Amino acid sequence: MQTEKDMELTRGSRYSVAFEKGDAIAGIFKGYSVVGSETALVIESDGTIRFVMVNHIRSITLLESKTAETKKKKEDPGVYYG
């Protein structure tokens, strides 16, 4: 059974992104960005950073998974008003 975590794009994992017109690129997912008012995936492919507009994506295939690193949160000291 898949969990919600299995359906998220993981930074550092390698994906193949196919576009509406049949073109595709493969690369490492770096994160998300906003270009104008549109959302884009940031993919590093062949040493080049590419911004892939999500409205042009037809499919995304996971090629190589990198386990998500869990960061420990520092204990929040809270807010102090003196």
Image (cartoon, rainbow, N blue to C red):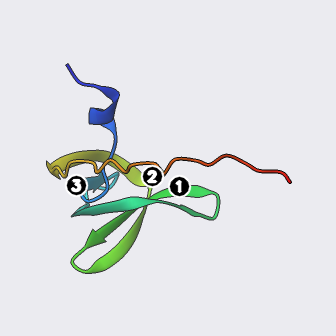
- Pointer 3: what residue? 15
Per the model, the C-alpha gap separating discs 1 and 2 is 6 Å
- The residue positioned 21% from the left and 48% from the top of the image is 67
Q: Quadrant of the N terminus?
A: top left
Amino acid type at circle 2 is: Val
Mark 3 crowdedness (10 Å alpha carbons): few <14, some 14-19, many ≥20: many
Q: Is residue 34 left or right of residue 57?
A: right
Report the residue that reaches farthest toward the top: 1
Label 2, secondary structure: give it.
Answer: helix
Per the model, the C-alpha gap separating discs 1 and 3 is 18 Å
**Where in the figure is residue 37, as x and y percent of width and height?**
64, 58
Whether 59 is drawn above or below 51: the answer is above
Residue 42 falls in image quadrant: bottom left
Camera-nearest label, 2 or 3: 3
Report the residue that reaches farthest toward the right: 82
Whether 53 is drawn above or below 76: the answer is below
Q: Are marks 1 and 2 in contact (CB under 8 Å)?
A: yes
**Where in the figure is residue 6, as x and y percent of width and height?**
26, 34
Mark 1 crowdedness (10 Å alpha carbons): few <14, some 14-19, many ≥20: some
Amino acid type at circle 1 is: Thr
Q: Earlier in the sequence, mark 1 or mark 3?
A: 3
- Pointer 1: what residue? 39
Q: Earlier in the sequence, mark 1 or mark 2?
A: 1
- The residue positioned 35% from the left and 75% from the top of the image is 49
Whether 2 is drawn above or below 69: the answer is above
Q: Nearer the viewer, residue 24 or 5?
A: 5
